[in-house]
Image (cartoon, helix red, strand yellow):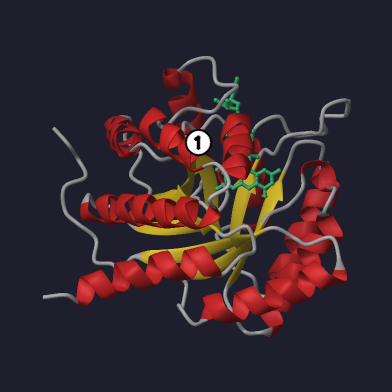
Amino acid sequence: TKRITTGTDVVTANISFEFFPPQTAEGVEKLRAARAKLAALEPEFFSVTYGAGGSTREHTLEVVFDIQREVLPVAPHISCIGATRETTRELLTRYQAAGIRRIVALRGDLPSGTADAGEFRYANELVEFIRRESGDWFHIEVGCYPEWHPQAKSPKDDLLAFKRKIDAGANSAITQFFYNFDAYAAFVDAARGLGIEAPIVPGIMPIGSFSKLARFADACGAEIPRWLRRQFEAYGDDTASIRALGLDVVTGLCEQLLAAGAPGLHFYTLNQAGLTTEIVTRLRSRQDEP
Ligand code: FAD
């Protein structure tokens, strides 16, 4: 039996927006402008990624505290590969002292050639550590993979790894991006079958440029369906057509996900307001239609 059957109202759906920390002053300014536009959509929270091995650590903290100063809800990502308990504890203490209540806890990927894996191996160990250090202070989000993590030995192993993170105390999950609705539906079914009851929020990647998307998708094991890839390839340099098709496809996917009961949508904004705003606005205006 399908376990996701009752639809989610787009008005009550938990919408969240992810940023990466810019490396330049210009990038910081652009992100502020994007954030102001996205804040008008009243997301549940903004999240900020964190480079494995602490590579963007200070930039992440700057953006996190910048968002906090704007009195907007913020969820820093923390990755544990290459990290020590001591530096992780320090980070948690800073966030807790600043009144931050939500964290996205990940393993992360070390840049190739980096030898020191640090004191944590997998994300479940980080979740366990956060709970041990700070009790129930943080709402902990973890990542999960409807099309399976590229390093997983098997789908079953990946599901069990996901379950270990929930059992260690994670409250909810955000998925890697995907364009196959069925992969999400089957993943949620399988997770429920294992007794995982935590909300599983689909991660949504708006499509602005096909070449960029193809690179991302390859790196993280997300499939671009053949029918869609062929269409994008046929458009070549016609960016307007790529954008229009991307908006239609991603908005349609979001509608399908919410209709199937997905609890919300987490947008990988890539620090751009335009596409995400357009998708959320379309979703909300369609909801208003009689
Ligand atoms: P884990 O849950 O630890 O899983 C990693 C792999 O190990 C999986 O293949 C799993 O099946 C396997 N595994 C788990 N436990 C075991 C075990 N005991 N034995 C053998 N295999 C095991 N990366 C960043 O660097 N910074 C970010 O800010 C960031 N944000 C992200 C946000 C989201 C929502 C998502 C989905 C991903 C994000 N990533 C980020 C990418 C993420 O770090 C990578 O996908 C990473 O490879 C896996 O992280 P994880 O937390 O899912 O790892």
Horizontal and vertical percent position of residue 16:
49, 64
The verdict on label 1 being within 8 Å of ligand 1 is no
The extreme left residue here reads 290
- Please identify the quarter of the rendering in which residue 228 is found: top left
Q: Is residue 92 left or right of residue 188?
A: right
Q: Residue 32 at what x, y percent from top left?
A: 69, 77
Q: Would you say 271 lies left or right of 45 here? A: right
**Can you name the residue that lies furthest to the top here?**
153
Q: Please count the marks in the image.
A: 1
Q: Which residue: 60% across, 53% down?
A: 104
Work out whether residue 207 can be spotted: yes
Q: Residues within 10 Å of mark 1 (few under 14, many from 20)?
A: few
Give x and y (percent) for residue 179.
40, 40
Residue 269 horizontal side relative to residue 243, left or right: right
Please state which of residues 20 and 33 is positioned toward the viewer in this rendering.
33
Q: Nearer the viewer, residue 251 or 83?
A: 251
x, y percent for residue 242 = 48, 50
Q: Residue at x 42, y 38 (%)?
A: 231
Quarter of the image with the N terminus in it: top left
Let me know if residue 146 appears in the view. no
Q: Residue at x 81, y 33 (%)?
A: 111
Residue 235 higher or lower than 229, as above or below: below
- In the image, residue 65 sits, relative to residue 199, either above or below, namely below
The quadrant of the picture occupied by the C terminus is bottom left
Q: Secondary structure under badge 1?
A: helix
Which amino acid is tagged 1?
A: Glu
Residue at position x 62%, y 74% in the image: 34
- Which residue position holds label 1? 233
